[in-house]
Amino acid sequence: MVRLTKIYTKAGDAGQTRLVGGQKVDKNSARIECYGTVDELSSCIGLARTQLEQPGAPAGAAELAAVLRRVQNELFNLGSELATLPADLHPQQPVVQARHVTALEQEIDAWNEHLPSLKSFILPGGGFVAAYLHLARTVCRRAERLAVALAASEPVSEQVVPYLNRLSDALFVMSRHAARLYGESEPLWEPERT
């Protein structure tokens, strides 16, 4: 059980922080950038989930909110894993596994089955929830790029990049699903309207 009794420590005032294993690193290091962006991603997903949980949300909103809550927990696990050097991972520490990637793939396929096929690229929009999920998708892509960069210089679990890659795809399909739940139209790219 985690117990936080003091929120500020002043330990980071010199621009450094500690990893889970106690190693001091600069706050702008690749590892911190990566798990900080994963945290930002979870916050974006929280915007969408909060909207889905509002009274009067359409049928199907609660199910999507539940998936997003699960994803936020998985992202917290991922952030914890990224904040820990592989040699310091505790055997009981929750980590992202192949089964999490597979679950996202199954959800993508299930939602996509009921969506109209695309004849153009979609512009972010389609109502608040869809727009929040598009925002989350772009932050997820940034987290993925940062994870790839981190993996080029430091050891990273083999499921980190596949999970973020699949999650960004899932967030795209979720945004389309959300637009449909709320009866919103999806704005399509019209290249001639420039």
Image (cartoon, helix red, strand yellow):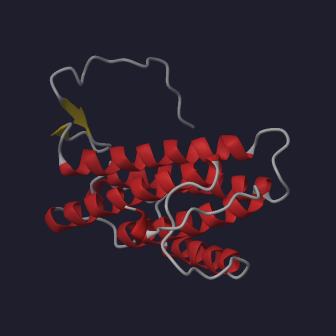
Q: In which quarter of the image is the C terminus?
A: bottom left
- Residue 125: x and y in percent read 56, 54
- Left or right, 152 with respect to 95, comes to left
Q: Which of 15 and 94 is in front in this view?
A: 15
- Left or right, 155 with respect to 124, comes to left
Q: In which quarter of the image is residue 63?
A: bottom right
- Residue 148: x and y in percent read 25, 66
Q: Can residue 156 be seen in this view?
A: yes
- Left or right, 141 with respect to 129, comes to left
- Residue 146: x and y in percent read 26, 58
Q: Residue at the spot x=28%, y=42% of the render?
A: 19
- Left or right, 53 with respect to 43, comes to right
Q: Residue at the spot x=59%, y=41% of the render?
A: 47
Q: Quadrant of residue 64?
A: bottom right
Q: Residue at the spot x=70%, y=78% of the render?
A: 110
Q: Which of 194 and 86 is in front in this view?
A: 194
Q: Residue at the spot x=76%, y=58% of the render?
A: 183
- Work out whether 79 lies above or below 122: above
